[in-house]
Amino acid sequence: MPRPMKYRIVNGHPVTNVFKPAGIPQCELEEVLLTLDELESLRLADLEGQYQEEAARRMGISRQTFGNIVESARKKVADVLVNGKSLRIEGGYVDIPGPSFR
């Protein structure tokens, strides 16, 4: 029996949940899903510049799990930027205790 997933603590919902290239209708774009915990990992590691150990502690997960999440998030964002795809932010196994990103 696999170990149950642990909720990841995130700092809230983003202001908007879809990003896409300008001038191309959404229906014509391939969509990539970025979960809220992946967004939080990018925020902590890349925007705030925190080390993985501290960022993992703030999310309530192990450093290795944090590293896996941020690696997945970076690959998705790079795919969106390089290949001109749409990015949707939603879902994930998260707990949102405080105020939002707004």
Image (cartoon, helix red, strand yellow):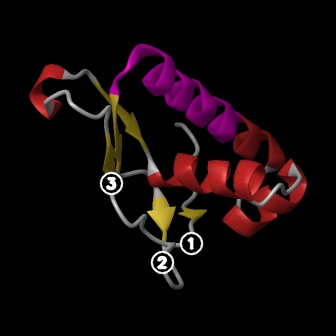
Magenta stretch: helix, strand or loop mostly: helix
Point out residue 12 in the picture as x, y percentages from the top left corner. 48, 72
Point out residue 49 in the picture as x, y percentages from the top left corner. 83, 55
Secondary structure beneath dot 3 equals loop
Q: Of all residues shown, which one is farthest toward the front? A: 23
The amino acid beneath tag 1 is: Asn
**Disc 3 versus disc 1: distance between alpha carbons?**
15 Å
Taking the magenta stretch, the answer to whether it contains residue 82 is yes
Residue position marked by numbered label 1 in the rendering: 11
Q: Residue at x 14, y 21 (%)?
A: 28
The amino acid beneath tag 2 is: Ser
User: Which of 13 and 92 lies nearest the eye of the viewer?
Assistant: 13
Q: Residue at x 70, y 64 (%)?
A: 60
Q: Decide which of tag 3 and tag 1 comes sooner along the chain.
A: 1
Residue position marked by numbered label 2 in the rendering: 100
Depicted 18 relative to depicted 23: above or below? below
Q: Is residue 51 left or right of residue 98?
A: right
Q: Decide which of tag 2 and tag 1 comes sooner along the chain.
A: 1
Point out residue 32 in the picture as x, y percentages from the top left corner. 35, 29
Residue 82 visible somewhere in the drawing: yes
- Marks 2 & 1, CB-CB < 8 Å contact: yes
Secondary structure beneath dot 2 equals loop
Residue position marked by numbered label 3 in the rendering: 17
Depicted 40 relative to depicted 78: above or below? below
